[in-house]
Image: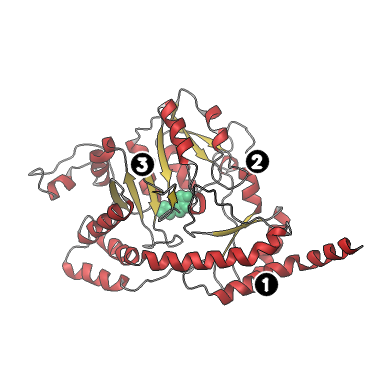
């Protein structure tokens, strides 16, 4: 059944097909060409990233990070349980043992107070996820990483154009991974980016990106032939993808402004229900900005969430829950050490995401909010009667 209001709708900002045509006409559509360079330049300039490499997905960028981090079988990597599979998978493929950390009570990001007790002499890296584009507390996290000599790999898949104390997310850890999947703010269908902040990984990152060869150096005229020098894979996207992405990046301010206006409208419209205690609204810590990647509510339990999703569905609106705790997944449950991760499970059961995309209208938000309010209205009335007794 097609939804009257879908959960997401990919937005074409204007010149995507024009740039793709240009790339095709130029006679080079494999990777590491003109549009890849334009994207690299744009992103390093705007966010002061030391080095970036476009990839075919954020999953790929995380895999590159795991290779660069030289994760070996038996090494431990700390990852939140409430995240997408790829955050853990990239390290599992290197043979790591993933140690899952719980979310915080106030938002789905990892609980920084629970990190230190999980660090052992086998721990090599921490992978914070900036859920919904809202920063983890990076000062505390980096301090802990420095104390124990651990690498920090930011899963910034959702975090483009978001900041921690004025610093762009993805610029703080040693490495970071972004996604341009069609469900994110800035898209190329499938797509991603590795950010290399620690200088020592810079050269090897390029080599791993280009199938274990020093081809990038050859292209720049730094060597007169290129050859096989390391492990690697084909992590780079074609120019067709980069051309699409460049058109999106050119319009990033317009895209962000629109999403932010929609997000703020949702928030302000739902405050009454939150004040009445029926749902919780997103919590944005003082050190974090909001890049309007996602608008979510936290219901009191799974039954109430199902009621809400069903009520919206009956009205042709698709709202969706999100991750299922990875420590309880079919693949990992027998490998997990048995600790309860209560907040990860709470978000698994209680978090619901509402439609949010460029072409959503304020009128559609009014409709969505009216249906949600309708679910709780009978109770609002019942309580008012109670209070009058
Ligand atoms: C979307 C997402 C990914 C995966 O991104 P792809 O580009 O689809 O590989 C990884 N981690 C998080 C937190 C995400 O939201």
Query: Do we see residue 93 in this rendering?
Result: no
Q: Which residue is mark 3?
A: 175
Q: Residue at x 54, y 66 (%)?
A: 7
**Mark pair 2, 3: CA separation:** 29 Å
Circle 2 crowding by C-alpha within 10 Å: few under 14, some 14–19, many from 20: some
Circle 1 crowding by C-alpha within 10 Å: few under 14, some 14–19, many from 20: some
Residue 25, image x, y percentages: 18, 71
Q: Residue at x 32, y 41 (%)?
A: 197
Q: Residue at x 16, y 66 (%)?
A: 27
Q: Is residue 336 above or below residue 272?
A: above
Queried on whether the Cβ of the residue with tag 1 lies below 8 angstroms from ligand 1, the answer reads: no
At numbered mark 3, what does the secondary structure look like: helix, strand or loop? strand
Residue 355, image x, y percentages: 55, 66
Q: Is residue 23 above or below residue 132?
A: below
Question: Which residue in the rendered view is the most extreme toward the right?
Answer: 389
**Mark pair 1, 3: CA separation:** 43 Å
Q: Within the image, what quadrant is residue 377 found in?
A: bottom right
Q: Which residue is mark 2?
A: 342
Q: Residue at x 41, y 67 (%)?
A: 255
At numbered mark 1, what does the secondary structure look like: helix, strand or loop? helix
Q: Is residue 57 above or below residue 361?
A: above
Q: Nearer the viewer, residue 289 or 155?
A: 289
Q: Which residue is mark 1?
A: 370
Q: Quadrant of the N terminus?
A: bottom right
Q: Nearer the viewer, residue 33 or 366?
A: 366
Q: Looking at the image, is mark 1 or mark 2 nearer the viewer?
A: 1
């Amino acid at each position: 059944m097609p939804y009257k209001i879908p959960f997401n709708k990919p937005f074409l900002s204007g010149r995507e097909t024009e740039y793709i045509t240009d790339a095709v006409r130029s006679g080079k559509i494999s990777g590491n060409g003109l549009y890849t360079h334009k994207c690299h330049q744009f992103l390093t300039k705007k966010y002061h990233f030391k080095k970036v490499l476009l990839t075919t997905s954020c999953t790929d960028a995380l895999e590159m990070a795991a290779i660069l981090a030289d994760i070996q079988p038996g090494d431990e990597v700390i990852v939140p349980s409430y995240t997408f599979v790829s955050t853990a998978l990239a390290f599992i493929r290197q043979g790591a043992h993933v140690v899952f950390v719980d979310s915080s009570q106030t938002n789905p990001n990892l609980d920084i107070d629970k990190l230190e007790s999980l660090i052992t002499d086998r721990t090599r890296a921490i992978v914070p996820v900036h859920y919904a584009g809202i920063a983890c507390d990076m000062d505390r996290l980096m301090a802990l990483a420095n104390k124990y000599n651990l690498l920090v790999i930011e899963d910034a898949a959702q975090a483009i154009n978001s900041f921690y104390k004025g610093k762009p997310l993805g610029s703080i850890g040693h490495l970071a991974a972004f996604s341009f999947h069609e469900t994110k703010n800035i898209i190329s269908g499938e797509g991603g980016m590795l950010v290399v902040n620690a200088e020592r990984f810079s050269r090897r990152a390029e080599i791993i990106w280009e199938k274990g060869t020093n081809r990038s150096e050859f292209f720049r005229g730094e060597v007169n032939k290129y050859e096989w020098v390391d492990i690697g894979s084909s992590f780079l996207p074609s120019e067709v993808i980069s051309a699409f992405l460049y058109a999106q990046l050119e319009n990033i301010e317009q895209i962000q402004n629109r999403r932010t206006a929609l997000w703020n409208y949702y928030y302000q419209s739902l405050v009454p229900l939150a004040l009445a205690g029926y749902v919780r609204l997103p919590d944005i810590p003082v050190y974090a900005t909001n890049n309007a990647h996602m608008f979510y509510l936290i219901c009191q339990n799974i039954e109430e969430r199902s009621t809400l999703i069903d009520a919206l569905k009956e009205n042709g609106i698709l709202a969706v829950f999100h991750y299922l705790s990875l420590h309880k997944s079919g693949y990992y449950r027998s490998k997990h050490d048995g600790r309860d991760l209560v907040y990860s499970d709470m978000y698994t059961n209680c978090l619901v995401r509402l439609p949010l995309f460029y072409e959503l209208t304020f009128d559609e938000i009014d409709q969505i909010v009216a249906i949600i309010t309708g679910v709780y209205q009978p109770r609002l009335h019942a309580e008012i009667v109670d209070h009058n007794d």
